[in-house]
């Protein structure tokens, strides 16, 4: 009973939010995240976070468009695929396929804003629920392992109920997603693979791959610009 009461209290705290403390650790975590994403060895491991959000983007938008979410896979080479069933043509399929590459930047900017606004706990709860759904739909052992690791980490940070730790971790993940979105998108533009999302969109629409690359670039750029605007006051507050 005490455990359930404690769980309910933490959940209530997450929904209510908290005042983000003025702490150098917050800025340190943000800067560290931006730096380590550029380190090849570390990036090879962290990029799975970007892939998970990319694939969840396909799943969430697909469900929102009336499609059924039936499978979720991430691979060790940063690739992955989400299985949704529904109409083989139409705006629902187009939006589902389009959502992947912009989603890490959009989510990164959104959770960075949420963390700086005292809503890091709520972000952790939502992320946990989405990953549980993805775990149920997992189609490979590697996917299960990755999601379990992310669930354990997310659950632990949330259970500590530490405003400073939660804000720092969620902000850092936001930066990883923002920078990672650029790296992931740049990779697909440079490789020009026929199985990439832009190439597949070009095959099912009259619009060329270049157009879809440009259309994906817009939300990534806007999310990055918005995040930069949110970070400037934080940096000024810490260094002043």
Image (cartoon, rainbow, N blue to C red):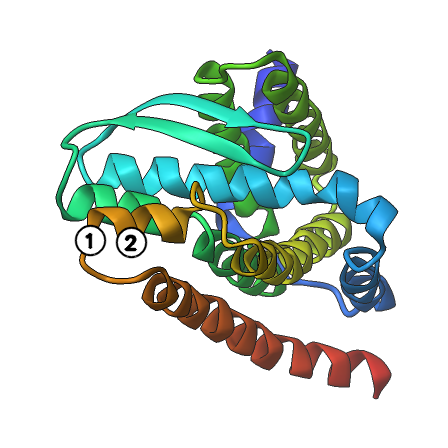
Contact, CB < 8 Å: mark 1 with mark 2? Answer: yes
The residue under the point 73% across, 50% down is 169
The residue under the point 22% across, 46% down is 204
Label 2 Cα neighbours within 10 Å, binned few <14 / some 14-19 / many ≥20 = some
Is 140 situated above or below 174? above
Is 42 situated above or below 131? below
Tag 1 secondary structure: loop
Q: CA distance from mark 1 to mark 2?
A: 5 Å
The residue under the point 55% across, 58% down is 185
- Residue 65 percent coordinates (x, y): 20, 41
- Residue receiving disc 2: 202
* Residue 111 location, quadrant: bottom right
The residue under the point 38% across, 40% down is 58
Label 1 Cα neighbours within 10 Å, binned few <14 / some 14-19 / many ≥20 = few
- Residue 52 percent coordinates (x, y): 55, 37
* Residue 179 location, quadrant: bottom right
- Residue 33 percent coordinates (x, y): 78, 58
- Residue receiving disc 1: 205
Of the 4 image quadrants, the one containing the N terminus is top right
Tag 2 secondary structure: helix
The disc at residue 79 is none
The residue nearer to you, when weighing 76 against 194, is 194
* Residue 240 location, quadrant: bottom right
- Residue 13 makes an appearance in the image: no
- Residue 3 percent coordinates (x, y): 64, 16
- Residue 120 makes an appearance in the image: yes
């Amino acid at each position: 009973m005490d455990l359930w009461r404690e769980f309910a209290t933490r959940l209530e705290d997450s929904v209510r939010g908290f005042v983000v403390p003025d702490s150098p650790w917050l800025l340190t975590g943000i800067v560290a995240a931006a730096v380590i994403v550029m380190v090849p060895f570390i990036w090879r491991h962290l990029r799975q976070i970007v892939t998970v959000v990319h694939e969840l983007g396909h799943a969430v938008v697909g469900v929102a468009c009336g499609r059924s979410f039936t499978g979720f896979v991430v691979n060790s080479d940063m690739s992955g695929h989400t299985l949704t069933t529904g109409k083989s043509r139409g705006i629902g399929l187009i939006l589902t396929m389009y959502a992947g590459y912009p989603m890490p930047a959009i989510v990164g900017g959104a959770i960075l804003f949420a963390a700086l606004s005292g809503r890091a706990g709520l972000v952790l709860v939502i992320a946990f629920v989405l990953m549980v759904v993805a775990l149920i739909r997992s189609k490979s052992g590697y996917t299960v392992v990755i999601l379990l690791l992310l669930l354990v980490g997310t659950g632990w940070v949330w259970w500590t109920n530490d405003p400073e730790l939660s804000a720092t971790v969620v902000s850092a993940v936001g930066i990883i997603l923002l920078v990672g979105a650029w790296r992931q998108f740049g990779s697909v533009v440079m490789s020009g693979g026929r199985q990439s999302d832009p190439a597949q969109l070009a095959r099912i629409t009259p619009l060329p791959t270049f157009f879809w690359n440009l259309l994906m670039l817009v939300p990534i750029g806007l999310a990055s610009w918005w995040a930069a605007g949110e970070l400037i006051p934080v940096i000024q507050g810490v260094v002043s």
